[in-house]
Amino acid sequence: MNNITYINNKFVKHSNAKISVEDRGFLFADSIYELIGVFNKEIIDTDQHLNRLDLSLKKVKIKYRFNKEKFKKIITKLIKLNNIFNGYIYIQITRGVAERKHEFPKKYKPTTIIFTKHLNIDKKIYEKGVKIITIPDLRWLRRDIKTTSLLPNVLSKQLAIEKNAFESWLIDNGNITEGSVSNAWIIKSSNTIITHPANNKILKGVTRDTVIKILKKNNFNIKERSFNLIEAKNAKEAFLTSSTLSVLPVVKIDNYNVSNGKPGDITKKIMYLYNNYIVKNKNSLAKELKIAWLNQ
Ligand code: PDD
């Protein structure tokens, strides 16, 4: 079956979805994006993602007739057409096609593309947890904007892979901000759960916000504050979050084992709670993952 992609008001075969070489998204990364997880055919936190998309447009001053209901219709249609069970929806909006000059064109028509992808969930990483490395955060100071200008993130993630790790946690001024593609969390021996405050130094993850809401509702002690590498290495447990990874245990930071190198009990509980949230129909992701303890 053909994979269908949306481009500028048209649904076309994915391989026929083309942009101009003079698109400012391509030339300058003058463009923003959103990535929305789909689990068990359910689109997760649609409103929150679309609200952030609208906010990103405003922050980079792309003039756009934003219509949330239209986006909802398009993404629902694509999920059906492309038969996505587990996967994601990718939305990108650029400042359109214009002669290559840095300043905004006087008139422009933004480019909009939306495509979907299937994701095979790797059960092992949830059962065993992952290793992360720490490296300097070399990004700009508007990390709150979900821009496609991602070269420092790309290089950080690549370095992790080259070091046989899953993700890099980035250090700015002594503090861990977030991962190259995810938000970073630690759990102290006092059971306090800590993640960086949502300011210009991190992307305010939708999964991060949802997990905070779930934790508060379940009476966990949660603190949005900076933490440094020493605190992270001495943490009782650690995990990361993103729309494609959900809640993923971290068991090694550089060469230090966290929670004896195995996913900790509190992290498992948070995975269970988040899993329940995303699959309203009784733990189907847990069944899919066949992780026994997730069903406990
Ligand atoms: N990344 N921080 C960064 C730098 C990210 O790129 C992401 C998401 C997150 C988590 O945000 P959310 O929970 O809204 O997915 C935090 C996406 C998945 C990506 O670019 O592939």
Image: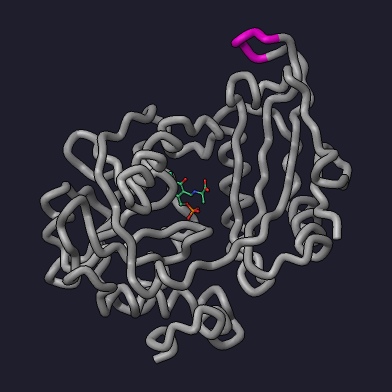
The residue closer to the viewer here, 78 or 199, is: 78
The reply to whether the magenta stretch includes residue 61 is: no
Residue visible at 56% across and 88% down in the picture: 282
- Dividing the picture into quadrants, the one containing residue 173 is top left
Q: Give the colour scheme of this rendering.
A: one colour
Please identify the quadrant where the N terminus is shown.
bottom right
Give percent across and percent down for residue 97: 75, 20
Read off the magenta span.
Answer: 100-104
Please identify the quadrant where the C terminus is shown.
bottom left
Give percent across and percent down for residue 252: 23, 59
Residue visible at 67% across and 10% down in the picture: 100
Seen in the picture, residue 290 relative to 46 is either above or below; the reply is below
Left or right of 160? Residue 71 is right
Seen in the picture, residue 190 relative to 49 is either above or below; the reply is below
The residue closer to the viewer here, 151 or 93, is: 151
Left or right of 233? Residue 281 is right
Residue visible at 44% across and 39% down in the picture: 144
Seen in the picture, residue 202 relative to 4 is either above or below; the reply is above
- Dividing the picture into quadrants, the one containing residue 189 is bottom left
Give percent across and percent down for residue 238: 26, 63
The reply to whether the magenta stretch includes residue 101 is: yes
* Number of dots carrying numbers: 0
Residue visible at 42% across and 80% down in the picture: 272
Give percent across and percent down for residue 134: 25, 44
Q: Main secondary structure of the magenta part?
A: loop
Looking at this rendering, what residue extends furthest in the bottom direction? 296
